[in-house]
Image (spheres, rainbow, N blue to C red):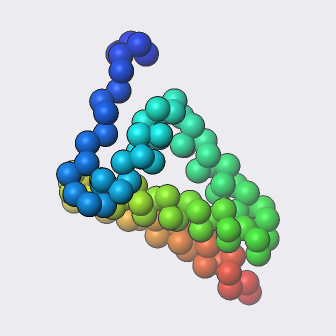
Amino acid sequence: MPSNDTPRPEPVATNAFERASLPATRFLAGLPPYVPVVVVFVLVILGGLLGPWGTIPLGLVVLFLVWMLALSWPRLRPSERLMRIAVVALVVGLTIIKVVPR
């Protein structure tokens, strides 16, 4: 198991989209690894509990997940892409359910 003292690799930008995202990815890389996961989890729970207003936190989660998917797309294997698309589709489905009540 690696030590917590080892520095994480610095994000490297290879195209315009990655260069534009570099400040945000640097910020995320500086956070403890569990923070983005906890924030996304809390936003999904809030989205489920807030009624029609739940579309706002769910929309933020969708935007974050799509951004992460776009950044990692060239480095992912097809099975990994499919799994991440499924997660985005699930959150988009939850958001649609909130927008269009029965």
User: Which x, y percent locates residue 60?
Assistant: 59, 62
Which residue corresponds to the image point at 30% horizontal and 54% vertical from the top-left? 18
Q: How many marks?
A: 0
Q: Nearer the viewer, residue 16 or 33?
A: 16
Please state if 77 lies on the left or on the right of 72 as rendered: left
User: Which x, y percent locates residue 56?
Assistant: 68, 68
**Can residue 83 be spotted in the picture?**
no
Please state if 41 lies on the left or on the right of 13 as rendered: right
Which residue corresponds to the image point at 49% horizontal and 58% vertical from the top-left? 64
Quadrant for the N terminus in the image:
top left
User: Which x, y percent locates residue 23?
Assistant: 42, 46
Q: Is 46 situated above or below 99? A: above
**Can residue 6 be spotted in the picture?**
yes
User: Which x, y percent locates residue 92?
Assistant: 53, 72
Q: Nearer the viewer, residue 94 or 52?
A: 52
Q: Nearer the viewer, residue 78 or 27?
A: 27
Q: Quadrant of residue 68?
A: bottom left
Q: Nearer the viewer, residue 42 or 16?
A: 16
The residue furthest right is: 50
Which residue corresponds to the image point at 31% horizontal and 33% vertical from the top-left? 10
Q: Is 13 situated above or below 58? A: above
Q: Is 37 situated above or below 81? A: above
Which residue corresponds to the image point at 30% horizontal and 30% vertical from the top-left? 9
Quadrant for the C terminus in the image:
bottom right
Q: Quadrant of residue 17?
A: bottom left
